């Protein structure tokens, strides 16, 4: 880390957490619980103000779920000193980490590729798999068709690569789980969701 | 800034107690994060048991510490909490858990199923159909449905990994051979989305069909065994059975002596020393609602 840090950047590290940590995390988790339980639904996840290029939604995911027990992999343009310091200060998460060891991986879809470098669990412990926090320009209830647990009939979401996500689902119960973030919006795609290109 | 206290004040009895600061919903933030991560993985792999680092809670294990930890990880201040024990809101267990969360999370509580946003339950699914936006948290004593067939955890893990559920079917079929029907009437095993065999907790098999395609989120917490599992809404849950012996969600062939319901699960209660008995709804809120007595 550089010795002569910019004071404005230093103070930005200390801000941007939940206003009321315990209750803020509780409310954010409830949004994530509903999102994971109802794949493809787009929900508002506000309350965090992380440094760019992290979206507020992705910041809130990390504040809610990441800590010293969860190595976080930062991909591409998300791997900046400011982002590392912010996550380090607010979550205490281990960074940098090897992709294969990551509990959470954060970045744009392109930066996160290839997906096969992340853990997708073992037959005995399929839960020992990474959750990918994918930054998208926007979330829309359009595009790829989603079906499976949590979806009454059908849901649609503008997934970046439906074929790759269908392949991920085909490995169920192994697989990666996804949280797509855009601004202060979030939508989840667990491995249990079957994906079909529109 | 307060003035430094002079000698005259030193001997004074302090009447204002220090405010006791609880973590929101009792558990510390690190523990809640760990449980929350487990809950999300549980929803992503319906019916699979996720291990978690279960904590000591200020209540004995038999009181549903697994359910309490799951509820604590899910609660927000806006929630309205209902707690039932075998269908009743007024047992010591249910009253204690409600009071615990009213105090540590400041949430409102209710006995009305329709009003609740989170319902923690032991041994029943409410009769009133659940809706989107509600969470049902089950207290689970033994989460592993294969445990009574195979005591070794490494073996049961392997059986789930390989979908090796033959032993379970053999056991159920032996029931049929011996009793003419499947004798299991509580904790009747289910299969989730055609993949994982799951213990629905010791609910009567009458309640099993309510688990399937339910609009609410269903979460299961086993404290002593340190396992969490889940059913997302709209998830297919089938009770194990055989073509020639299909599953039947049986109940006492009676109507409730209090409200007349013929379609709710009934408990047989002794009414006097002479051995008098009657059947009444196990779900006290449902029964009271039908009698128009709900407050
Ligand atoms: Zn009744």
Image (cartoon, coloured by chain):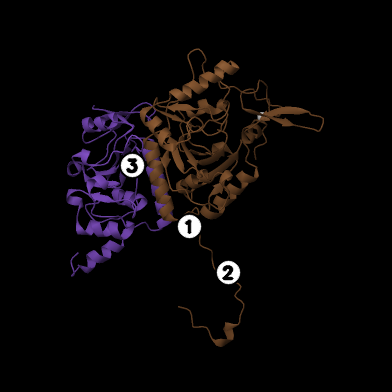
Image hue for chain B: brown
Q: Which residue is depicted at the point 52% across and 83% down?
A: B5
The answer to which of B224 and A42 lies nearer the viewer is B224
Badge 2 is on which residue? B17
Earlier in the chain: of badge 1 and badge 2, it is: 2
Q: Give the percent coordinates (x, y) of residue A129.
A: 31, 41
Q: CA distance from mark 3 to mark 1?
A: 28 Å
- Regarding residue B265, the answer to whether it shows in the image is yes
Q: Disc 3: which chain?
A: A
| Viewer-proximal residue among A161 and B252 | B252
Q: Nearer the viewer, mark 3 or mark 1?
A: 3
Q: CA distance from mark 1 to mark 2?
A: 18 Å
Q: Do callouts 3 and 1 point to residues on the same chain?
A: no
Ligand 1's quadrant:
top right
* Residue at which label 3 appears: A128
- Considering the numbered disc 3 on the image, is that residue within a helix, a strand or a loop? loop
Which residue lies at the image location 27% right of the left edge and 58% below the top edge? A86
Q: Position of residue A63 (x, y in %)?
A: 34, 53
Q: Quadrant of the C terminus of chain B?
A: top right
Query: Which percent across, then down, holds residue A177?
Result: 31, 39
Badge 2 element: loop
Question: Alpha-carbon neighbours of circle 2 within 10 Å: few (<14), some, or many (≥20)?
Answer: few
Query: Which quadrant would residue B93 be assigned to in this image?
Result: top right
Residue A78 lies left or right of residue B64; in this view the side is left
Q: Which mark is residue A6?
A: none
Q: Chain of mark 2?
A: B
Query: Which chain is home to disc 1?
Result: B
The crowding category of the residue bearing disc 3, from other C-alpha atoms within 10 Å (few below 14, some 14 to 19, many at least 20), is: many
Mark 1 and ligand 1: say if the CB distance to the nearest ligand atom is below 8 Å: no
Q: Residue at x 45, y 78 (%)?
A: B1
Identify by letter the chain in purple: A
Q: Quadrant of residue A11?
A: bottom left
């Amino acid at each position: 880390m550089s010795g002569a840090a910019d004071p404005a950047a230093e103070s930005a590290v200390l801000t941007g957490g939940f206003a009321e940590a315990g209750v803020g995390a509780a409310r954010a988790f409830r949004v994530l619980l509903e999102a994971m339980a109802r794949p493809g639904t787009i929900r508002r996840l506000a309350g965090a103000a992380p440094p760019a290029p992290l979206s507020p939604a992705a910041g809130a995911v990390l504040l809610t779920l990441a800590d010293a027990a969860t190595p976080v992999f930062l991909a591409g343009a998300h791997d900046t000193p400011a982002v590392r310091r912010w996550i380090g200060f607010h979550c205490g998460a281990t960074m940098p980490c090897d992709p294969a060891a990551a509990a959470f991986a954060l970045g744009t879809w392109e930066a996160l590729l290839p997906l096969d470098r992340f853990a997708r669990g073992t037959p005995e412990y399929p839960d020992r798999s990474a959750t990918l926090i994918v930054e998208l320009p926007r979330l829309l209830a359009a595009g790829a068709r989603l079906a499976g647990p949590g979806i009454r009939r059908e849901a649609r979401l503008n997934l970046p690569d439906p074929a790759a996500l269908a392949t991920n689902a085909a490995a169920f119960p192994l697989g990666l789980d996804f949280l797509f973030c855009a601004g202060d919006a979030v939508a989840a795609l667990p491995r249990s969701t079957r994906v079909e290109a529109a | 800034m307060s003035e430094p206290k002079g000698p005259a004040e030193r001997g004074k009895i302090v009447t204002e107690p220090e405010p006791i600061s609880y973590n929101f919903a009792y558990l510390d933030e690190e523990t809640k994060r760990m449980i929350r991560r487990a809950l999300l993985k549980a929803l992503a792999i319906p019916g699979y048991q996720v291990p978690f680092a279960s904590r000591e809670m200020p209540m004995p294990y038999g009181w549903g510490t697994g359910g309490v930890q799951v509820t604590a990880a899910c609660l927000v201040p806006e929630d309205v909490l209902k707690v039932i024990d075998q269908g009743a809101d007024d047992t010591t267990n249910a009253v204690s858990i409600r009071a615990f969360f009213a105090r540590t999370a400041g949430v409102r509580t209710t006995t009305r199923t329709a009003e609740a946003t989170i319902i923690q339950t032991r041994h029943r699914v409410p009769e009133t159909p659940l809706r989107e936006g509600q969470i049902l948290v089950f207290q689970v004593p033994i989460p592993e449905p294969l445990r009574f067939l195979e005591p070794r955890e490494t073996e049961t893990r392997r059986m789930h990994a390989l979908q090796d559920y033959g032993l379970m079917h053999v056991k159920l079929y032996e029931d049929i051979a011996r009793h003419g029907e499947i004798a299991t009437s509580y904790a009747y095993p289910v299969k989730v989305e055609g993949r994982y065999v799951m213990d629905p907790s010791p609910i009567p098999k009458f309640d099993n069909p309510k688990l399937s395609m339910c609009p609410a989120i269903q979460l299961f917490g086993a404290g002593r065994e340190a396992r969490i599992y889940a059913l997302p809404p709209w998830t297919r849950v089938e009770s194990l059975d055989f073509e020639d012996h299909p599953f039947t969600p049986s109940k006492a062939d009676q109507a409730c002596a209090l409200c007349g319901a013929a379609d709710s699960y009934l408990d047989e209660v002794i009414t006097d020393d002479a051995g008098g008995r009657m059947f009444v709804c196990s779900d006290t809120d449902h029964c009271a609602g039908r009698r128009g007595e709900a407050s």
